[in-house]
Structures are given as structure tokens and as C-alpha cells.
Amino acid sequence: MVAPPVVETPPVVETPPVVETPPVVETPPVVETPPAPALPPVAEVPPVPEPEAPEAEQNAGGSSGTLSQQNAVGMARDYLEYTAFSRTGLIEQLEYEGFSNQEATAAVDSISVDYGQQAAKAAQDYLEYTAFSRTGLIEQLEYEGYSTADATSAVDGLSVDYGQQAAKAAKDYLDYSSFSRSGLIEQLVYEGYTQEQATYGVNQTGL
């Protein structure tokens, strides 16, 4: 028999040298944080003295009234220089500006105003803006707060050609919508024009 080949023994692997573990470094002791210094006590803020009321307000019972009342009077005068107002209309305007009803009423009543002249001025302003019949203009002034007497006197004191007013109104209506001849005459009569004025106005349109 043939003997099997001899298997060579592998070389012995040398064990690496043991690495020495480095010495443990001791952790330094924890330093305690010193306590925070106490804050000084907060000084109390002295109360702010209230401003003294204006002399006008101190003498509220005097003839000059409070500062607010004086402002209301000044604003009422400014409005009257700008446009026409009835008594109630001017009071309402001042209330809209933030014055109380008492302040507004006192301010308006302290001013000398001819509301008849104011009504006449308002009537003229309205006629420059659009067409009115006599009754329509009186009703508009009453709506603005003028008395019937002031409104009527103001309108009758103006020189107005209501036939021409009817013609202007008729044209405005036709610019806005379609009308038959009779329908437009009826519309103008409804607006306060007389039958004669309404017919004249419609005739001017060529309808």
C-alpha cells in the first residue's frame, strides 16, 4: 500500500503582546456654583400727580362753559360758514363729531342763527344740484330739519321757474329710464309739479 502524504503542521501564530490599560484619570471634584447675590429691593415708583383741570373746566358753571363745550361752539360756527344747517341738523352733526347731545344742543342754542336764511341758502344749493318742484323742495327742507314755516318762506322767497325745473326733471328721467308721454307727465305730477308745469316739461323733451 502507498502511504498517504504527510500533512504539514501550520506554523504557530504568535500571540500579540498584551497592551497595558492606561491608568484611570480621576474626575476632578464638582465645584459648587456660588449662590447668586440677592437683588436689591425694587424702589416703589411715586404716583404721577394728576394734571389740574383747565380753568374753563373748573368754572364749568360759568358763562364760558367747559373746554368741550367751547369746542362744540367753535365747530358749530365753522359748519355754518361752510354750508346751511337747520337747528336739528346742526345738533346731529355735532353729535356725529362725538359731542354729547347736551353739549351739542347747548352749543347750537348759544349761537345766534337765522334759520330762515339757512333754509333759503339750503334751497338754493339744492336747486343747483337737481330739479325740484315747489312742494318737493319744501318737503326736502323739512326732511333736513327746517320747520314748515321756514321751509315754505325760504322756497317762496326764491325766484324759480318751475316749468324749467319740470323740463330738467323730465330729461333726467328719460336719461335714466323709458317713459311714455302720459307716463312721464304723471311721474312729474307725482313729484309735485302742477299739470301745466309737467306738460310743459315733457313738451320740452320732444316726447
Image (cartoon, helix red, strand yellow):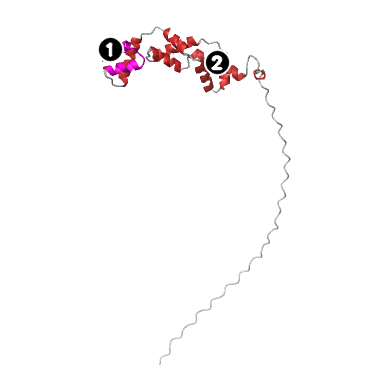
**Can I make out residue 137 in this image?**
yes
Q: What amino acid type should be assigned to the residue bearing mark 1?
A: Asn
* Measured Cα–Cα span from mark 1 to mark 2: 47 Å
Using the image as rendered, state which of residue 188 and residue 48 is in the foreground.
188
- Indicate whether residue 155 is drawn in magenta: no
Horizontal and vertical percent position of residue 29: 70, 58
Residue shown at the point (54%, 17%) measured from the top left: 75
Image quadrant of residue 125? Answer: top left
Using residue 178 as the reference point, say whether residue 112 is left or right of it: right
The kind of secondary structure the magenta stretch mainly shows is: helix
Using the image as rendered, state which of residue 147 and residue 154 is in the foreground.
147
Please state, as top left, top right, bottom left or bottom right, where the N terminus lies in the image.
bottom left
Residue shown at the point (56%, 19%) measured from the top left: 104
Query: How many marks do you count on the picture?
Result: 2
- Magenta residues (range): 182-206
Q: Residue under label 1, please give it.
A: 203
Secondary structure beneath dot 2 equals helix
Q: Residues within 10 Å of mark 2 (few under 14, many from 20)?
A: many
197 up-or-down from 49: above or below: above
Q: Tell me, for residue 108, which label it has, or none.
A: 2
38 up-or-down from 139: above or below: below
Using residue 173 as the reference point, say whether residue 21 is left or right of it: right
Please state, as top left, top right, bottom left or bottom right, where the C terminus lies in the image.
top left
Secondary structure beneath dot 1 equals helix
Residue shown at the point (35%, 17%) measured from the top left: 190
Horizontal and vertical percent position of residue 66: 62, 18
25 up-or-down from 82: above or below: below
